[in-house]
Amino acid sequence: MAAAPPQQPMLIRVVETDRARKLKLSSRPASVDALIKIIKEQLEIDLDFSLFYEDPDFDGKLTSLADIEELPEKAIVHISLSEDSSSTASTDLLSDVSSPESLSRWPQGPFPVPTFAFDFELKLQHGNAEYERSNRHLKLTRDLKHDILEKLASTMYSFKAYPSDKEIAKAAEALVAKHPCSKEAGSETGCNGWKNSIKFKMGNYRTKIRWAGCQEVTVNAGKRSRSNPDNEPSHSNIKRPKRAEVNFLPNFPQGKDPSSLDQLRQAIVEEVKKAEKNLPLIRKLMETTFPLHRQTIVMSCPPVKELLALWPALKMESELYAEFQRITNQNLPNTFYAELDRHLPRLMTLFRQKASKTGKTADALAEILRIHDEQEIHDIHTKRTTVLHALPVYLREDDESDELELDGVEVALFTVISDHDTTSPVHYQPVKISVVIESDAVVSLPRFGEAFLVMFGLIYALHLSYPKALTNTLDFTQKILLGLERGKLSPRLQTLKNDLVM
């Protein structure tokens, strides 16, 4: 009888939300569930989770671990907490917290025209049938038009308190497309009057919501008027979403006030100081105190150093990404890496085409690509690093990478290297890369792609302006990769977008 082949030992790097640990196994576990059990026991993790691993067949991209035989003998696995894992957290504080309100993102397709009152829907149906037979427009009564505008304003507000003119036009176009009998006979588009009416109605609707106590519009109340002639002008310093923030300034949870939420904030500060952090507890407390974060950030606008002292959990990658999702309803790392990786081949082709020409931009790109081609390993991390270094050059951003002093820097990435080649435009094995905001190194990460993404997330979470030297690059990230606020693009970005889809 043939002897069974000897079991090979395994070396596994287990990556959690805010740390990574090494695990040595004498043999391959019998199943994925067996591996999860071993990780729970040896690393003392009491939460339910699933596993992803960096797949060498796909340049290190994360793949769900379904078969234990797929795992290399030397592997990197990532823990993904289950949705209900927070139920195992401390109940002393969790029993008294709740999630803030959540709006929806503005729809990317046609605007969803709401259903109106039953009798009005019948009138519109009969009107549409008559319009199809005789091309006769429906004469709208005052009550019918009021109901249409009220429902449209309510639906639009569920997406955005301050819709743009383009978005208002989309709503008007959707209305006359669904109910052609409501078209205006004297209008070229059939909806010019509807656009003006909807815009005026949205202003009235915000006033109504402000009287009801909605924080997002109340913040802009108290402007200059006859009774308050010394206040700010009505159109100055308006605080409104600018980058597709769907939860810009939410109300406090029911039964909560600034004092009670600040007590929870202090609990977060103490929990973050611990070596063994209760991550589900921090996540739940950050969700509940989210309205207080936003009020402090948007209304008080303290320095970043002070903000991060108040909310130190924002320095943790997992909590920063959770904050971004609360603000935009979008998973930042998943969407960013998926879209960036999808465009990597085409971007590299565009960069090489530009590098083959003459000029300062071509020379800079050629140097970055030369260093890239000299690398022994061309995994997904190497490609991301190359593209993210080359993108600002390709977009002809102002290059301030030679500036080694942190004083006066608003937002930047600062690379620390161990070698003496300080003139190289890109480093694939740095000691660390620090995200610098307002001259302070806020957080440090090992890879350029991760540091870039954390910098972008912090800009959103802290309501900062894009640094002038990276405006096009960050607009590309926001509008093209993440699809947030797909509005007007600069000529350079529009050209790049056109080239990407060719």
Image (spheres, helix red, strand yellow):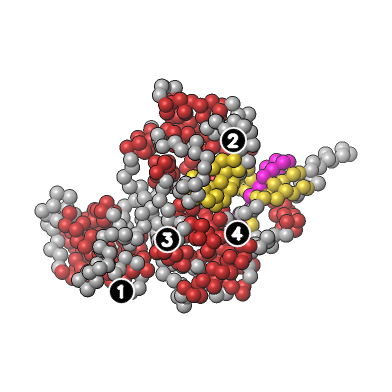
Asked if one can make out residue 13 in the rendered structure from this viewpoint, the answer is: yes
Q: Distance between the residues labelled 1 and 3?
A: 25 Å
The residue that disc 1 covers is 211
Q: Is residue 27 above or below residue 17?
A: above
Q: How far apart are marks 4 and 1 (CA)?
A: 40 Å
| Element under disc 2 | loop
Q: How far apart are marks 2 and 3 (CA)?
A: 36 Å
> Which is more toward the observer, 243 or 303?
303
| Element under disc 3 | loop
Mark 1 residue crowding within 10 angstroms, few (<14) / some (14–19) / many (20+) = few
Question: Which residue range is magenta in the image?
Answer: 69-81
Front tag of 4 and 1: 1
Q: Which amino acid does label 1 sit on?
A: Trp
Does the residue at mark 1 contact the one at mark 3 (Cβ under 8 Å)? no
The residue that disc 4 covers is 82
Whether residue 32 sits left or right of residue 323 in the image: it is right
First-in-chain label (2 vs 1):
1
The N terminus, quarter of image? top right
Front tag of 4 and 3: 3
The chief SS type of the magenta part is strand
Q: What residue type is labelled 4?
A: Ser
Does the residue at mark 4 contact the one at mark 3 (Cβ under 8 Å)? no
Q: Is residue 133 magenta?
A: no
Q: Distance between the residues labelled 4 and 3?
A: 35 Å
